[in-house]
């Protein structure tokens, strides 16, 4: 693939993962229409345009992501022969006005969200305990979520969304120290709650807690379920759906929906993983998994 004609900032808003693999999975791209359900910094959309896509609808619930994507794709936006439509919307709430030749969804949190302390997604730098993917919404911040939910609620979230073995100990400690207003305060409360072996293990003891709380604040798994139920109708027969996930809760849902949906043929029996070269260049790609399915011809569906 040739170098993009658009300019890219020295530090992109978000580095899209498995880009070459996603493009290959979509089949014929030239002069066709695609939906990028999570445009982020525009990496997958840029690759689609480089491959000759004629039209792309680009969604994101984060206004900052859309701004970054518009800046990155500025050269394409000036062209008369290509059309990019941006919409700030959660893909779960999206109502398409047409069918697409393919759909891409890169799930999870973006690099920019993780790297900005004021977004509150990471315990690696102190900031307000926010975690909202859409900061313009009326949704509760992570701090407000903790204020308004019970210890039992937190145990359930940590167990289900974080698969956290010390969920009860952590929930008890966190609730005892409310109100918590910063990422550092939450991380410290978690670290003190777990046994020393977990406190000084390979991963930070707050890793699963931050993941679980972020998923709860943003309703991520519910949104993914809604996308997976709707997306087969968004593509034409033969159209591909490529979804990149970053943890087992997402991947299991994608795998299950793809396999059980009679409208789809599974393309990837096993998920596609990043190469060693991609992981070396972008360590955050190491947990990524790509699964692909295609819409069956209508005659095949009606015959079942």
Image (cartoon, rainbow, N blue to C red):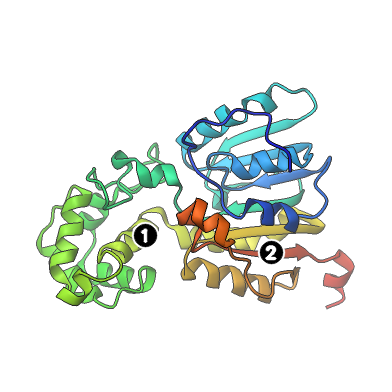
Where disc 1 sits, the SS reads helix
Tag 2 residue: 292
Q: In front: 272, or 64?
A: 272
Label 2 with label 1: CB-CB less than 8 Å: no
- The numbered mark at residue 300 is none
Query: Left or right: 268 with respect to 70?
Result: right
Query: Left or right: 231 with respect to 288?
Result: right
Can the viewer see residue 226? no
**Percent position of residue 17, x then y:** 57, 52
Q: Nearer the viewer, mark 2 or mark 1?
A: 2
In the figure, residue 5 lies in which quadrant? top right
Can the viewer see residue 50? yes
**Percent position of residue 65, x then y:** 49, 37
In the figure, residue 290 lies in which quadrant? bottom right
Residue at (37% x, 39% y) in the render = 135
Tag 1 residue: 216
In what quadrant of the picture does the C terminus appear?
A: bottom right
Q: In front: 175, or 148?
A: 175
Q: In front: 23, or 81?
A: 23
**Percent position of residue 64, x then y:** 45, 34
Query: Left or right: 166 with respect to 213?
Result: left
Q: Earlier in the sequence, mark 2 or mark 1?
A: 1
In what quadrant of the picture does the N terminus appear?
A: top right
Where disc 2 sits, the SS reads strand
């Amino acid at each position: 693939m040739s170098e993009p004609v658009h300019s890219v900032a020295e530090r992109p808003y978000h580095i899209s993962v498995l880009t070459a693999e996603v493009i290959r999975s979509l089949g014929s791209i030239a002069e066709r229409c695609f939906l990028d359900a999570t445009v982020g910094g525009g990496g997958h959309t840029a690759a689609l345009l480089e491959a000759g896509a004629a039209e792309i609808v680009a969604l994101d619930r984060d206004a900052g992501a859309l701004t970054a994507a518009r800046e990155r794709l500025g050269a394409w936006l000036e062209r008369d022969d290509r059309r990019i439509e941006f919409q700030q919307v959660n893909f779960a709430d999206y109502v398409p006005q047409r069918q697409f030749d393919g759909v891409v969804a890169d799930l999870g949190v973006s690099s920019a969200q993780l790297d900005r302390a004021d977004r509150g997604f990471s315990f690696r730098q102190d900031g307000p305990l926010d975690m909202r993917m859409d900061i313009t919404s009326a949704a509760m911040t992570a701090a407000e979520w903790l204020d308004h939910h019970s210890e039992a609620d937190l145990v359930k979230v940590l167990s289900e969304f974080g698969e956290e073995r010390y969920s009860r100990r952590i929930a008890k400690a966190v609730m005892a120290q409310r109100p918590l207003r910063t990422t550092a305060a939450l991380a410290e409360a978690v670290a003190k709650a777990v046994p020393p072996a977990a406190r000084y293990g390979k991963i930070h003891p707050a890793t699963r807690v931050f993941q679980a709380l972020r998923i709860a604040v943003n309703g991520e798994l519910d949104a993914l379920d809604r996308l997976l139920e709707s997306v087969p109708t968004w593509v034409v027969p033969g159209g591909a759906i490529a979804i990149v996930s970053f943890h087992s809760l997402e991947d299991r849902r994608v795998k299950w929906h793809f396999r059980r949906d009679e409208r789809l043929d599974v393309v990837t029996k096993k998920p596609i993983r990043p190469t060693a070269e991609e992981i070396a260049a972008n360590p955050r790609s190491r947990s990524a998994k790509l699964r692909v399915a295609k819409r069956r011809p209508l005659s095949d569906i009606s015959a079942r």
